[in-house]
Image (cartoon, rainbow, N blue to C red):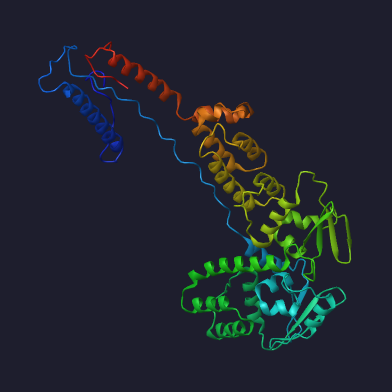
Amino acid sequence: MAASVKCCRYLETSALHAEGLTGMFELAVRVGVAGMKASVKRKKGGFFAVKKKTGSGPPQIILPPVMPPTGFAPEIEIETCTIGDQWLASLHQGSCADTALILPSGVEIKSHKTVLSSASEVFKKAFGIEHRMIAEKSQMEALMKRTEFDHPAISKVQIDDLHLTKIYLTDKVEPEVLKHALEFFYSGTVSFDDDPSTELLDSIREFCDMFDLPYLKQICDNVENDEEFLNPSIGTYVCDLNGQKMKALFFNQQAYADADVKFTFGGKTVYGHRSILSARNKIMAAMFDGRFLEKRDDQMTTIDMTKDNELTIETFLLMLEYLYTGHAPLDNDNVDLISLLVLSDQYNITRLSNLCELYLTKLVDRKCVKNIEKADIDVIGLLNVSNIYNAPQLAKWCRFFISSNYLPFSTRPEWNQLSSEDLEHVEEQRWPPVDYLNELTEYEKLVEAQRTGKHDRSGCIMM
């Protein structure tokens, strides 16, 4: 059709469905601009210039081929944080419980001092746990503080022979209120089976006043004002806040922070808490069942980590910090993101793997911003690691990045390390595509022929 009417290009459009209109108008503009340039060249000799006979027909307009867009890089999606749900599950299951909250009726509720201390200053003082920056005191002095603790909602604190801390509550704490307060301590929010009565909300507010819980009080106000949609955001913030407090109080701490597990790396030791690690990771929980233990004595579980020769203590601490807080400082240039990605896969921590995938893409962008051929990062090697250690989003992103920068990557020495499957994908999706490069070569020949006057100007050029 285009050849028969001697036009530049044939396009199909639909105004009804708004299809092809943008491309049509862009082509029209390009043809117009090219025509204007040709017109300027014709007038360059001046008004009285003698026109040379250059053949029949109008001046030829040669349009360059349209470079196809590269598209957008695949986005890395991060799994939703479930730290609050995991803590709440540990409360309901009573696993690794080291504390019993005892109501005046004698009912005992198993709980965890790590969570209670992080969520409440009152419980932190009741347990005698101090921030690691406070001057060191003996364990006996800490125990004395526990027995001397005075609070209107707590009558006494005792530690039995099995190292279970028993906190006796007064009648100021109602069972139903305690139930919702514990849910808040563990998950950052509260759910009610039915519309709560005003009396229940007021009782919870009184509890908040005793334990200094402004966010729980705000949750109750939101429920009463039909603004419950605000509570999930409060829950997320509270979980983050409690995670940071948990890090300050317990992360890799031994001195009267009640650490009950240690991971040995030769001459170095990392301390942890079974209640935290078991709640946050199933593989960690399995490590404490006896099969992987080096020894257990004086309530301390020891696990030898030197069997994994490639694991560094720095990478392990990053994973541990994520388990304690739900976050890890991955934006530090000194972080070995690839090793952490491998470790995350080993312990099946999907969200941490997602975060590693995201920050690795940012690292590649920074390293390759000036020159891909000489960049000091192996993107093809990163693609191979992604395929091995279950990082499909990163693998997809790397394939796109390599395909979109085909020519510079094809000159790098690691090009031959691409798997046959990845190479096939890159060749199919390469940018610029082969068809475009062929059209560009033909265009350059036509431009050169027109410049030297060897081109037949009797018709339009089809591109």
Task: Name, please, the residue furthest toward the left.
Answer: 48
Q: Is residue 323 visible?
A: yes
Quarter occupied by the C terminus: top left
Judging depth in this view, the residue of 268 and 78 nearest the camera is 268
- Residue 313 position, x and y percent, is 75, 52
Residue occupying the point 54% across, 50% down: 77
- Residue 413 position, x and y percent, is 62, 27
Judging depth in this view, the residue of 282 and 383 nearest the camera is 383
Residue 259 against residue 442 in the figure, above or below: below
State left or right for residue 260 relative to residue 336: right
Where residue 196 sits, quadrant-wise, is bottom right
Residue occupying the point 67% across, 65% down: 87
Where residue 453 sits, quadrant-wise, is top left
- Residue 46 position, x and y percent, is 14, 23
Judging depth in this view, the residue of 13 and 8 nearest the camera is 8
Residue occupying the point 41% across, 25% down: 436
Where residue 71 sits, quadrant-wise, is top left
Quarter occupied by the N terminus: top left
State left or right for residue 297 relative to residue 213: right
Q: Is residue 195 visible?
A: no
State left or right for residue 272 relative to residue 176: right
- Residue 441 position, x and y percent, is 39, 19
Residue occupying the point 53% across, 42% down: 365
Residue 419 against residue 443 in the figure, above or below: below
